[in-house]
Amino acid sequence: MNPLQRAIALQQTDFFESLPDEVLFELGQSCELLDCAPEEIIITEGDEGDRMYVLVQGEILIYKNNELLATLEPFKCFGEMAFFGANRRTSTAIAKDRALLLVLDKEHFFTITNEFPQILHNIIQIISQRFQAQIAILENKIKTLCSGKN
């Protein structure tokens, strides 16, 4: 996969879809390609993390406390929580079948964001939207639990 193909793959993710072509190409050049075998563990809950991943082909299973939380399909990002702050992985990611990933290294990524700060702006917006959606889900669960007790 050449840098242009990597840039095109990055453009299909919610984190990077609105970035200018030159920024996408720069990111594409800095990505590594990771070919994962079926059932390969990519990240482990509790481990330190300095990489973020973009799924290009295949499916990734996301587990928390050995419970399946999600199945990711192509052009979804994962590993961003440890990458941007927590430093520890909040879940485990396992390739369901063979998977192809783009890997963003934290050091290279933040070097690029110094030149193109719009990247961080986009990511902050997406993470904020995800948190708002999770809060709404939790509020509904709390309401359901509370109404069942009355």
Image (tube, rainbow, N blue to C red):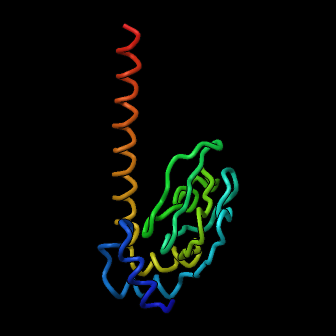
Residue placed most toward the observer, 28 or 117:
28
Image spot of residue 48 (x, y percent)? 68, 58
Question: Quadrant of the rendered structure where residue 118 is?
Answer: bottom left
Image spot of residue 47 (x, y percent)? 70, 55
Residue at x 32%, y 77% (from the top left corner): 19
Image spot of residue 127 (x, y percent)? 40, 55
Residue placed most toward the observer, 63 or 14:
63
Q: What is the tally of numbered marks visible in this picture?
A: 0
Residue at x 63%, y 73% (from the top left corner): 36
Image quadrant where one finds the C terminus: top left
In this rendering, position of residue 37 left or right of residue 74: right
Residue occupying the far top of the picture: 150
Image spot of residue 30 (x, y percent)? 53, 84
**13 shown above or below 5:** above
Question: Quadrant of the rendered structure where residue 50 is?
Answer: bottom right
Residue at x 49%, y 55% (from the top left corner): 71
Residue at x 53%, y 76% (from the top left corner): 102
**76 shown above or below 33:** above
